Image: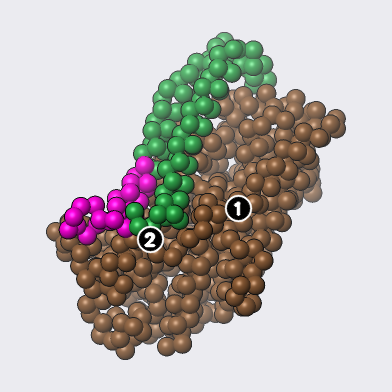
Amino acid sequence: MKDEDIVERIQKNPKFMQFVTMRNNYSIVLSILMMIVYFGYILLVAFNKQFLGTKVAAGAMTSIGIPLGLGVIVFTIVITAIYVRRANSEFDAIKDEIVREASK
Amino acid sequence: MIKAKHILGGAAALLLAGAALAAGADLGQAQKQATNWTAIVMFGIFVGVTLFITKWAASKTKTAADFYTAGGGITGFQNGLAIAGDYMSAASFLGISGLVFGSGFDGLIFSIGWLVGWPVITFLMAERLRNLGKFTFADVAGYRFDAGPIRTFAACGSLVVVAFYLIAQMVGAGQLIKLLFGLDYIVAVSMVGVIMMTYVLFGGMTATTWVQIIKAVMLLTGATFMALMVMFQFGFSPEAMFAKAVEVHSKHDAIMSPGALINDPISAISVGMALMFGTAGLPHILMRFFTVPSAKEARKSVGWATTWIGYFYILTFIIGFGAITNLIPNPAEYFVNGDIAKGLKGGGNMAAVHLAKAVGGDLFMGFISAVAFATILAVVAGLTLSGASAVSHDLYASVWRHGNVDSATELRVSKITTVCLGIFAVLLGIVFEKENVAFMVMLAFAVACSANFPVLFMSVLWKDCTTKGAVAGGTVGLVSSVALTIMSPAVWEVSLGHAKGTAMYPYASSAIFSMTAAFAVIWIVSLLDKSAQAAKERALFPAQLIRSETGVGSSSASGH
């Protein structure tokens, strides 16, 4: 079957738009989460340096800003991994199903 | 001594620039050191191996598709390493560890900024790029837009970013090699140019990819070893490491909290935007998504890339603290005239290299020096390849010849462009030798986030976007980002030497205004565009959407 025909059939399938909306919402929610975490950290640096310099415990050397900062790095890696995992399994399965229906 | 001061000045400029920006930061003027044979031999081995790979790659590079995308046969894991190799520059290794060595905490703020663009690419761009594009990111916008104007614009956006980035890398390379290997600046810059051209010219994307992979593995291995040795000294207790660092560092407890890096909130947000969205507009990074066979592999690549880059930044933080605890107690060995106040031998960016010697001896220091050089080669090769593809695929084949060109001719044009870009890079490297080029990387990021990213984003995700809107908005972003960056304190006062307080634009980055302006203009001009062409472009959106979301009809792996 030609690609054009498949495209036309996918376009007529209500599941397709549903899928696109669902996945876009997921991407947007994750992007916003990432922005909140990053810009939150940067604004703490801009506005409240004292807080970031506070020690994690009495007598400790480590300041709160260090585990928080490393936490932002780890969060970035984890949130990316979560998306890739879900997109490569669940989303791809739905997408393959839609394409298969259209190719029949 | 004057030189050491200059390097400190460079570091201060970097800070001022909030130039958190400086992935390929200026490494400052460097003092020529004694010829370092261990490093040269190690580097010779690296060049030998990569040239051998280039020879193998050359036998596989027959068509334009092979040249631009390695035939689309790279796996997600390999591409992830290659992206990391493309992105982790020598300056982010030496610069960030040097910054941690100098002021502790602030280095962490830099690292985070460099990383946060990756999830955005993952969530919004990677898969759509793979499904819509073929060789360059202009293919993506060119899917439904009028090829002439949109590709001309995209090629300009790419070339501007590539040119600024390339100059920063070449000047950094010359300084670094002078420092590490004890070679003359001109010899060093020419060497980088010739080796890089050899990779790209003969091996195209295949050779470039493998150079980047090998470099990434070497850099990650070397940095891991150093970080482990440092942690081992402290029984793997960060607390003990911080305690020792605070005890010996002249700033004492101040290294544990943020310094003067970011003060006003507008600069903070603006720098953050430039880093977060600029990464998604770097042509040499975007190009890497066309080397994998499917959207699935594209996602895997960016997942791996984020993991390696994040891991690497954690290592540089440990390395910076390791440098504090290892080098400061031994001033005779590592500091100018044995005086801590006079700074590290060779300048602040040498912290990681000196630490390599402290934990692994001369042999390991030679290895790290060679890695730093290899790093620059891998980055400039990727930049040159993306510049060449913008000229040959977008300007020559699509705009000039309207797509009526065979693969062999297009390939020949790419190779001619590669040689021109190589010569251009070497010449500019020599011209800018004495300049402070830290701002060049800032400019590259400012343009990437204000011109390339908005056009790409809107063309893919907004159905009413038209060619006129995209070109108008992109141009506004391009011009305003360059203008505002030049008028900012980091360029106007620090680099161009005007009096302090005379900069017309007070913030560290243009992004908050230039990127917003680009989006606004794209939106307004597209809405006002009632032409027949605009109607045609809007009508193509559903088909584009299906292809971008499902990959049906997208450029297949082996390409044709």
Q: Is residue B174 left or right of residue A4?
A: left
Residue at figure coordinates x 66%, y 60% from the top left: B484
Q: Position of residue B238 (x, y in %)?
A: 21, 57
The residue at the point 61 percent across, 45 percent down is B453
Q: Position of residue B509 (x, y in %)?
A: 58, 58
Q: Which residue is mark 1?
A: B511
Most extreme residue toward the right is B531
User: Residue B140 versus residue B16: which sits nearer the camera?
Assistant: B16
- Which residue type does callout 1 highlight? Ala
Q: Is residue A60 magenta?
A: yes
Q: Secondary structure at mark 2?
A: loop
Three-letter amino acid code at disc 2?
A: Pro
Locate residue B219: give its quadrant.
Answer: bottom left
Is residue B486 located in the magenta-colored stretch of the structure? no
Residue numbers of the magenta segment: A52-75
| Label 1 element class | helix
Give the quarter of the image for residue B425: bottom right
Q: CA distance from mark 1 to mark 2?
A: 23 Å
Q: Is residue A36 left or right of residue B320?
A: right
Chain represented in green: A
Judging depth in this view, the residue of A17 and B188 nearest the camera is A17
Chain letter belonging to callout 1: B
Who's the residue at 66% across and 37% down the image?
B458
Query: Which chain is in brown here?
Result: B
The mark found on residue B191 in the picture is none
Which disc number belongs to residue B258?
2
Nearer to me, B81 or B227? B227
**Residue B332 placement (x, y as % from top left):** 25, 85
| Disc number lying in front (1 or 2) | 2
Q: Residues within 10 Å of mark 1 (few under 14, many from 20)?
A: many
The quarter of the picture where the N terminus of chain B appears is bottom left
Where is residue B327? Give x, y as percent.
26, 75
